[in-house]
């Protein structure tokens, strides 16, 4: 006998043989994906610090490291069907939040499987915390946070279009407030070889989940620039040799015969209801129209962009 191993109490202290978890702990972690960063965990001080920073007023435009307006929060996709559809449509996901005790149906199981296979971070939170994160919206125990969109600076878009091996082509939007229209324009711009889309900070839709989805993936391939002042941005493009073509129902020239489209062009599209603002019109070199039947008042921005971009592409051969 070695030592006092037979002395009572000298060996393992405990209650004798203990039962294992039976895989319970392992199963509870399945499908959760990588651990989110500290700034994405609602209960972490880094998350609270980031939220406080985002709430502060934005500084000068160039203080945003030339990536667009600072302080723009991320977009949320809320509910089981919307989250599943967003994942299948390849929307960029930053974090998936799931409420404790959520009942697992086929949709939730498919979401968990997708996040696991694509290494998307998933964080389990209390239902009360998810209520707070989603602003009290009915979330069915699941919500997806998209990353804040990294807008290009107009000067960077100008540089890209000016130095390209093909003639510059940019689509500028004035007063387009429906994100689905923005997404449709982005899709058309990508289809016809535009270098990017230019939008103003105010009175304009941004890159929300609806815009991402409508773009059908084109938003990942073509940049969107955001200008503090659209008219000044148009002035800079004009000084760089771009022809500024505005679409207007009362335009003097058919879009199929606009002069100068064989060179660099900025195509400006206004809202379906109000059209181009007065100052934006004044910054256009030419106002062009798309001939339509008299009983139809106007076309929406997405359709108008497709037709105009096709005509510009055809004119360039």
Image: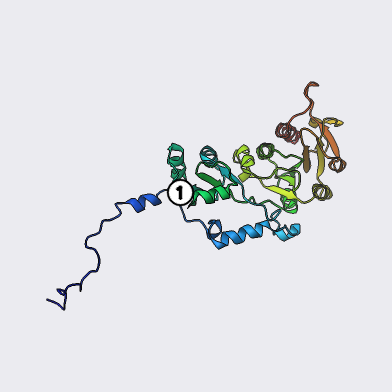
Which residue shows up at 76% across the image and 47% down it? 202
Can residue 267 be seen by looking at this rendering?
yes
Can residue 167 be seen by looking at this rendering?
no
Q: Quadrant of residue 308?
A: top right
Which residue shows up at 38% across the image and 50% down it? 28
**In this rendering, would 138 be left or right of 153?**
left
Where residue 137 sits: x, y (%)?
58, 43
Q: Is residue 51 above or below residue 91?
A: below
**Which quadrant would the C terminus be assigned to in this image?**
top right
Q: Is residue 178 above or below residue 11?
A: above
Q: Quadrant of residue 282?
A: top right
Q: Is residue 37 above or below residue 251?
A: below
Which residue shows up at 46% across the image and 38% down it? 107
Between 120 and 190, the residue placed more toward the observer is: 120
Where residue 98 sits: x, y (%)?
49, 47
Between 54 and 256, the residue placed more toward the observer is: 54
Which residue is situated farthest in the left direction here? 1
Tag 1, which secondary structure? loop
Which residue is situated farthest in the bottom direction here? 3
**Which quadrant would the N terminus be assigned to in this image?**
bottom left
Circle 1 residue:
100
**In this rendering, would 277 be left or right of 185?**
right
Where residue 171 sits: x, y (%)?
74, 41
Between 40 and 175, the residue placed more toward the observer is: 40
Q: Quadrant of residue 256?
A: top right
**In this rendering, would 297 be left or right of 196?**
right
């Amino acid at each position: 006998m070695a030592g006092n191993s037979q002395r009572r109490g000298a060996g393992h202290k405990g209650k004798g043989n203990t039962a294992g978890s039976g895989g319970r702990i392992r199963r509870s972690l399945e499908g959760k994906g990588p651990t989110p960063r500290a700034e994405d965990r609602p209960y972490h001080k880094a998350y609270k610090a980031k939220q406080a920073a985002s709430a502060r007023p934005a500084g000068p435009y160039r203080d945003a490291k030339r990536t667009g307006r600072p302080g723009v929060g991320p977009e949320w996709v809320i509910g089981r069907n919307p989250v599943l559809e967003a994942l299948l449509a390849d929307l960029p996901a930053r974090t998936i939040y799931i409420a404790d005790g959520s009942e697992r149906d086929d949709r939730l199981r498919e979401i968990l499987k997708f996040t696991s296979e694509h290494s998307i971070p998933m964080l389990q939170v209390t239902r009360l915390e998810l209520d707070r994160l989603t602003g009290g919206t009915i979330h069915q125990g699941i919500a997806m946070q998209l990353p804040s969109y990294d807008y290009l600076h107009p000067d960077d878009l100008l540089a890209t279009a000016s130095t390209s091996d093909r003639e510059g082509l940019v689509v500028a939007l004035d007063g387009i407030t429906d994100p689905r229209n923005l997404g449709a324009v982005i899709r058309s711009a990508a289809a016809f070889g535009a270098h990017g889309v230019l939008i103003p900070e105010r009175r304009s839709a941004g890159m929300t989940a609806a815009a991402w989805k409508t773009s059908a993936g084109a938003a990942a391939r073509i940049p969107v620039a955001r200008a503090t002042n659209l008219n000044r941005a148009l002035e800079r493009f004009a000084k760089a040799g771009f022809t500024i073509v505005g679409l207007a129902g009362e335009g003097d020239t058919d879009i199929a015969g606009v002069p100068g489209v064989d060179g660099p062009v900025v195509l400006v599209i206004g809202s379906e209801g109000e059209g181009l603002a007065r100052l934006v019109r004044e910054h256009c070199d030419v106002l062009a129209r798309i001939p339509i039947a008299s009983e139809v008042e106007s076309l929406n921005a997405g359709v108008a962009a497709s037709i105009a971009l096709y005509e510009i592409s055809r004119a360039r051969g």
